[in-house]
Amino acid sequence: MAAKRRSARKGAKKKGAKKAFGGYSIAFAGRKETVEQLFGKKPIAPSAMTKKLWQFVKSKRLGKKR
């Protein structure tokens, strides 16, 4: 009886599975900018790096949704 419940749960899990979050591909091929040009010469926090990187990707239209 317990085996039937386990198999029923597995089947239900597959039916209601959601698509994975994300799905962006970013191509930097052919870019001439350096990391120093993108982030600057002074040390910055990782959160600021992420913001600047995404700002660059969006402004140059480098990201594509899969």
Image (cartoon, rainbow, N blue to C red):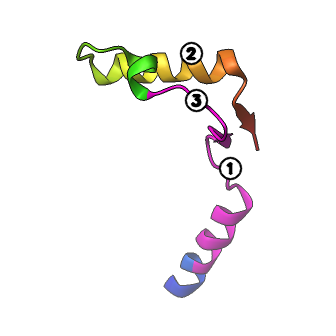
What percent of the width, then of the height, locates residue 17? 67, 56
The Cα atoms of the two marked residues, 3 and 1, are separated by: 38 Å
| Circle 3: residue type | Lys
Residue closest to the eye, 48 or 1:
48
- Which badge, 3 or 2, comes first in the chain's sequence? 3
What percent of the width, then of the height, locates residue 33? 53, 25
Q: Label 2 belongs to which residue?
A: 55
- Which quarter of the picture shows residue 62? top right
What percent of the width, then of the height, locates residue 8? 64, 74
Q: Label 3 belongs to which residue?
A: 32
- Which quarter of the picture shows residue 58? top right
What percent of the width, then of the height, locates residue 56? 57, 19
Say if mark 3 contacts mark 1, CB within 8 Å.
no
Instruction: Check the picture and name the quadrant holding the C terminus.
Output: top right
Query: Badge 3, how many Cα within 10 Å: few under 14, some, many 20+?
Result: few
The Cα atoms of the two marked residues, 1 and 2, are separated by: 29 Å
Magenta range? 7-34
Frontmost of labels 3 and 2 is: 3
Residue closest to the eye, 25 or 41:
41
Secondary structure state at the residue bearing disc 2: helix
The Cα atoms of the two marked residues, 3 and 2, are separated by: 17 Å
Q: Label 1 belongs to which residue?
A: 18
| Circle 1: residue type | Lys
Residue closest to the eye, 57 or 4:
57
Frontmost of labels 1 and 2 is: 2
The residue sitting at 23% across, 17% down in the picture is: 43
* Residue 28 lies within the magenta run: yes
The residue sitting at 69% across, 20% down in the picture is: 60
State whether residue 18 is above or below residue 33: below
